[in-house]
Image (cartoon, rainbow, N blue to C red):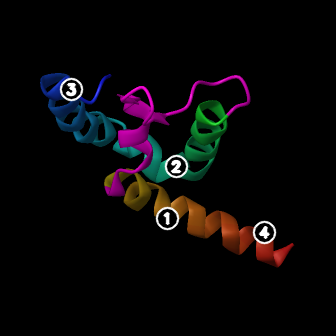
Amino acid sequence: MRYEEKAKLMAGKGLIPLAILVASPALLIAGAPIRRRYLRYVYRDEAPPILDKERGWVSAHYFIISHPLLEWLCWPTETLARLVEHRD
């Protein structure tokens, strides 16, 4: 999406929390592995940048990654994963 396309940006920002809430049961149960896999997909080597200021382009992935609701829903499983790693 381009920065100038305000309607698309607002629609994307509005629909992302709804999508996260729909996925919330899965995120509460297996949020850490899902989030790690998603971040690997977004930041893979051949992927386009999620934010390109020179061209005035922003990806929907930027809003998903930076949304606090996603971080909050993945927090329990990430904490549990850290506890299990420290016990090994």
The residue type indicated by label 3 comes to: Glu
Q: Could you give the CA–CA distance between mark 3 and mark 4, rounded to whole angstroms?
A: 45 Å
Which residue is label 1 attached to? 76
Q: Which residues are magenta?
A: 44-68
Numbered disc 1: secondary structure: helix
Instruction: Indicate which disc residue 37 carries.
Output: none
Numbered disc 4: secondary structure: helix
Instruction: Indicate which disc residue 85 carries.
Output: 4
Which residue occupies the extreme right position in the image? 88
Q: Could you give the CA–CA distance between mark 3 and mark 1, rounded to whole angstroms?
A: 37 Å
The residue type indicated by label 2 comes to: Gly
Q: Residue shown at 22%/37% (left/top)?
A: 13
Q: Could you give the CA–CA distance between mark 2 and mark 4, rounded to whole angstroms?
A: 16 Å
Measured as percent of width and height from the top left, residue 67 is found at 35, 51
- The numbered mark, 1 or 4, whose residue comes first in the sequence reads 1
Q: Could you give the CA–CA distance between mark 3 and mark 2, rounded to whole angstroms?
A: 33 Å
Which residue is label 3 attached to? 4
Q: Quadrant of the N terminus?
A: top left
